[in-house]
Image (tube, grey):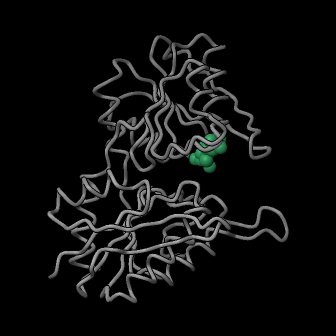
Amino acid sequence: MTSPLLLAMPGNEVLTEEIGSALGWKVGEIEERRFPDGESYVRVPTRLDDGPVVLVCTLAQPDEKFLPLIFASATVRELGASRVGLVAPYLAYMRQDRRFNPGEAITSRLVAKLLSQSFDWMVTVDPHLHRYGSLSEIYAIPTRIIHAAPLMSDWIKRNVAQPLIIGPDSESEQWVAAVAREVGAPYSVLEKVRRGDRDVQITLKDMHPWSGRTPVLVDDIISSGRTMIEAVRLLRADNWPSPVCLAIHGIFADQSDELLAAAGARVVTANTVPHSTNQLSISRLLTFALLEMMSHP
Ligand code: R5P
């Protein structure tokens, strides 16, 4: 089998180099910029040799990345790539998974359709699967999911002496229960009602049997940060020690990283979206998933 050529869309160079050196795969170049009128320019200066190509593109702030990614995929095919795979460590739009209000676009489905038309397969990390049981419900191409929960458990074991694992909402119970079991710590799941993009209401449960422990809030995504900020505020008001906010994907819209730090939280994320809080590395798990995908697509 010819080794794939890895191409990093802008901002994904570090992870791509890590994968390339771990697997001994060549890393090529891709150029992308904007014309003065805002249109995208994409060029693949690396010579392709009819082998497979893997594009690496995390999809935080997706709208600005999506069109150049589709252009890049089509271009490498025109230049001779036999197959084109996508590594999208953060998969955007998964939370819009039903019509919450009449007439809304179910964008998770639309993005899945577009990516399925452009790529032969996809590897991603913990996509937000809430109302979908699996990616195959919306993706028409083979997909592999990497689960970062073991990285979270590992980090907690090494860094927090007496943790109390807390999920900010019922959706997070899947992570929280698995992480708490692995760490050997108690857990609690809070109640959350989202009233708007930046408006969440959270209710603490009675966690006093575990007082003295360090709260570790565990979630898949920190987006506007309102979920974590509100949970941190309530915990501090209830005299808990400074919490740790542990998330896989740190999107940090609205400078929520700074707001969380100001609220007294320590924030830790995985490197699915490059950020100074990245302390969990998905590179190794990615290499396993890629090898598996290349041998049994
Ligand atoms: C809920 O659906 C997710 O698991 C996260 O709790 C949520 O996406 C976080 O969003 P935000 O940071 O905007 O509150």
Q: Is residue 26 visible?
A: yes
Going 32% across and 33% down the picture, which residue do you hit? 155
In the shown orientation, is residue 28 left or right of residue 262?
A: left
Query: Which one is in front, 173 or 196?
Result: 196
Which corner quadrant of the image does residue 114 belong to? bottom right
Q: Residue furthest front?
A: 36
- Residue 187 % position (x, y): 47, 31
In the shown orientation, is residue 62 left or right of residue 98?
A: left
Query: Which one is in front, 29 or 74?
Result: 29
Query: Which one is in front, 274 or 89?
Result: 274
Going 47% across and 27% down the picture, which residue do you hit? 216
Which corner quadrant of the image does residue 195 belong to? top right
In the shown orientation, is residue 46 left or right of residue 203?
A: left
Q: Is residue 170 visible?
A: no
Q: Relative to 125, is 201 above or below?
A: above
Q: Relative to 158, is 4 above or below?
A: below
- Residue 58 % position (x, y): 46, 58
Number of callouts: 0
- Residue 79 % position (x, y): 35, 87
Ligand 1 position by quadrant: top right
Question: For the C terminus, which image quadrant?
Answer: bottom left
Going 14% across and 82% down the picture, which residue do you hit? 1
- Residue 165 % position (x, y): 46, 30
